[in-house]
Image (cartoon, grey):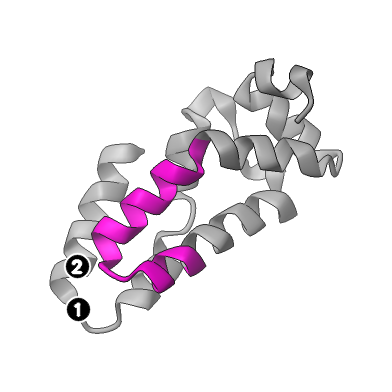
Amino acid sequence: MDTDLREASDAALVVAIARFREAALAEVYRRHGDAAFGLAVRVLRDRALAEELVQEVFLKLWQDPERFDPGRGSLRAFLMARHPIPGAAFLGDDFHSLFLYTILIEILI
């Protein structure tokens, strides 16, 4: 991993991701992947679905990094709240989990 990326701010990493630096995405994942996965597992109660959701979140960051606005909040909160609708789709008819998921997203924003 590039030393400069380990020392870069989250906002600088997102700029690097916009310039297609895969190492920048890897650094964002190193910093925030465990938190995103932990939240997904707690809410979804299914590791496989949590892995899919986290993969989707980081893929969307790679595809559309300009959506992140550091003036509106931290990158971690952005990643956690980025895709509540796909997360809700994974929950199906489990309204209790959907309710908990919605509350967690609101707390993180």
Where is residue 104? Give x, y as percent: 25, 48
Crowdedness near tag 2: few (<14), some (14–19) or many (≥20) residues, C-alpha within 10 Å: some
Image-quadrant location for residue 85: bottom left
Badge 2 vs badge 1, beta-carbon distance below 8 Å: yes
Amino acid on which disc 2 is placed: Ser
Task: Give the answer, above or below, for where 108 lies relative to 98.
Answer: above
- Taking the view exactly as shown, the residue that stands out farthest to the front is 1
Residue beneath label 1, please? 94
Residue under the image location 63 percent in, 44 percent down: 67
Give whichever of 44, 67 is nearer the camera.
Answer: 44
Task: Give the answer, above or below, for where 8 lies relative to 78.
Answer: above
Magenta segment, which residues?
32-52
- Taking the view exactly as shown, the residue that stands out farthest to the bottom is 93
Residue under the image location 23 percent in, 84 percent down: 93
Where is the C terminus found, in terms of image quarters? top left
Q: Does the magenta stretch include residue 55?
A: no
Residue under the image location 77 percent in, 38 percent down: 23
Where is residue 95? Give x, y as percent: 17, 74
Amino acid on which disc 1 is placed: Asp
Query: What SS does tag 2 mark?
Result: helix
Q: Does the magenta stretch include residue 44?
A: yes
Crowdedness near tag 1: few (<14), some (14–19) or many (≥20) residues, C-alpha within 10 Å: few
Structural distance between the alpha carbons of marks 2 and 1: 6 Å
In this picture, residue 11 sits left or right of residue 4: left
Q: Main secondary structure of the magenta part?
A: helix
Where is the N terminus found, in terms of image quarters? top right
Residue beneath label 2, please? 97
Where is residue 105? Give x, y as percent: 31, 49
- Specify the label residue 74 is tagged with: none
Image-quadrant location for residue 7: top right
Query: What SS does tag 1 mark?
Result: loop
Residue under the image location 37 percent in, 67 percent down: 47
